[in-house]
Image (cartoon, rainbow, N blue to C red):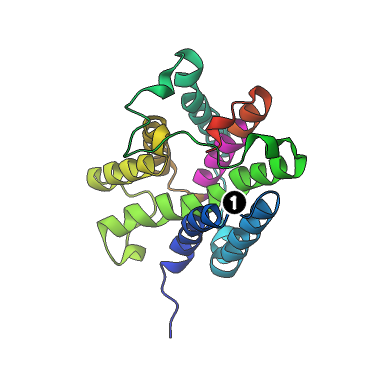
Amino acid sequence: MLKHPAIPYVAPFAVFILCLGLFGWLEIGQPWESILWVTVVAGTIWLTSRHLVASLRFPHWIGSVLVGVGVCALWVAPDALIPGWRESWLFQNSITGKVELSIPTAELADPLVLWLRVARAALLVPILEELFWRGWLPRWIQNSDFEKVPLGRYTTFAFVVTALLFASEHGPFWEVGLLAGIVYNWWMWRTKSLGDLVLAHAVTNACLAGYVWTTKQWQFWM
């Protein structure tokens, strides 16, 4: 049986979502939950998508780094500039959920837990999310035989739907998630390079991890 062409793009993201729900329900505790999460997700990427990851190139790496830093600034700006911004019912409600730490504050004192969280955010999440959000979904929206659609091909419908769904993934941070989705979609359209999107996303998450670690604003690590 031939391997479905969508699997390398979709499987890591699907396992990521499954892990978020399953590990939260099992209440394994740290650092074992983080170790298991990194192992399972990294293993899935290796088994299903390593050929895609190995093919990634960064022809616009300077711009991608700048885009990544800019998205991080957009992400933290509302909460940094406007006290109580995130407490509004627009962001915390029965639909979007509430800002709740995925790792108890006491366990964040463990350096291993922190470094595993940074590895998850800066190394694994950019790969699995960009394979799904920019590599597969907008192309599949345009044509169920998504391989016929070139990377970065623009249609308004695919652009908007992808940005909105990307925003919904981020719950109480949906508004900055929407901005990030718009910027990333635009950069994909400009570069036609999935590698540059992975790099930009990795820079965003690495900068955000540095901000969180430095300021102790753990709520950004839901």
On whether residue 204 falls in the magenta region, the answer is yes
At label 1, the amino acid type is: Leu
Q: Residue 137: in sight, yes or no?
A: yes
| Residue 101 image position (x, y, % from top left) | 55, 37
Q: Nearer the viewer, residue 87 or 150?
A: 87
Residue tagged 1: 124
Instruction: Name the residue at the right extreme.
Output: 111
| Residue 9 image position (x, y, % from top left) | 45, 61
Q: Quadrant of the N terminus?
A: bottom left
Question: Left or right: 119 with respect to 9?
Answer: right
Residue at 71% over, 42% down: 115
Q: Nearer the viewer, residue 58 or 220?
A: 220
Residue at 47% over, 33% down: 99
Instruction: Name the residue at the left extreme.
Output: 157
Q: Quadrant of residue 206?
A: top right
Q: Nearer the viewer, residue 187 or 123?
A: 123
Q: Secondary structure at mark 1?
A: helix
Residue at 53% over, 46% down: 198
On whether residue 214 falls in the magenta region, the answer is no
Question: Left or right: 142 with respect to 72?
Answer: left
Q: Main secondary structure of the magenta part?
A: helix
Q: Residue 60: in sight, yes or no?
A: no
Q: Nearer the viewer, residue 76 or 144?
A: 76
| Residue 152 image position (x, y, % from top left) | 37, 48
Instruction: Name the residue at the bottom extreme.
Output: 1
Q: Quadrant of residue 14?
A: bottom left
Residue 199 to residue 73: above or below: below
| Residue 57 image position (x, y, % from top left) | 57, 51
Write the start and end of the magenta stretch as one range.
Answer: 195-207
Q: Quadrant of residue 95?
A: top left
Q: Residues within 10 Å of mark 1 (few under 14, many from 20)?
A: some
